[in-house]
Amino acid sequence: MMAELGYVGSADYVEMWKQSVRVEKAQYPALVGVAYFNQREVYPWPENFGAPDWRMKNQILK
């Protein structure tokens, strides 16, 4: 299972991701689920790490 997947970008880009993650991938036969997550961290991390942004931005799907 893939946990905490998210995406952000133009409407066309988001739609492409939404469609792509719903298609079974032959190269990942053991992948049985994906949990969608698309959020910036709401609390800053310790030791000056800041607040991570967990969103995927304009990455090319292969």
Image (cartoon, grey):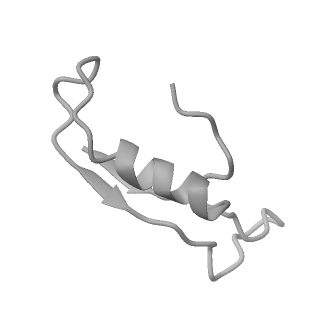
Residue at 83%, 66% in the rendered image: 48
- Say whether residue 13 is left or right of residue 1: right
Q: Nearer the viewer, residue 14 or 45?
A: 14
Residue at 37%, 62% in the rendered image: 36
Q: Is residue 55 visible?
A: no
Looking at the image, which residue sits at the far right?
48
Location of the N terminus by quadrant is: top left
Q: Is residue 52 visible?
A: yes
Res 51 quadrant in image: bottom right
Vertical arrangement, residue 44 with respect to residue 36, above or below: below
- Say whether residue 24 is left or right of residue 4: left
Total of numbered circles in the picture? 0
- Residue 26 position, x and y percent, is 23, 19
Q: Nearer the viewer, residue 45 or 55?
A: 55
- Say whether residue 48 is left or right of residue 37: right
- Say whether residue 39 is left or right of residue 19: right
- Residue 4 position, x and y percent, is 41, 58
- Residue 49 position, x and y percent, is 78, 62
Residue at 31%, 58% in the rendered image: 35
Looking at the image, which residue sits at the far top?
27
Vertical arrangement, residue 24 with respect to residue 28, above or below: below
Res 43 quadrant in image: bottom right
Q: Nearer the viewer, residue 10 or 48?
A: 10
- Residue 31 position, x and y percent, is 21, 34
Residue at 68%, 47% in the rendered image: 58
Vertical arrangement, residue 28 with respect to residue 42, above or below: above
Looking at the image, which residue sits at the far bottom?
42
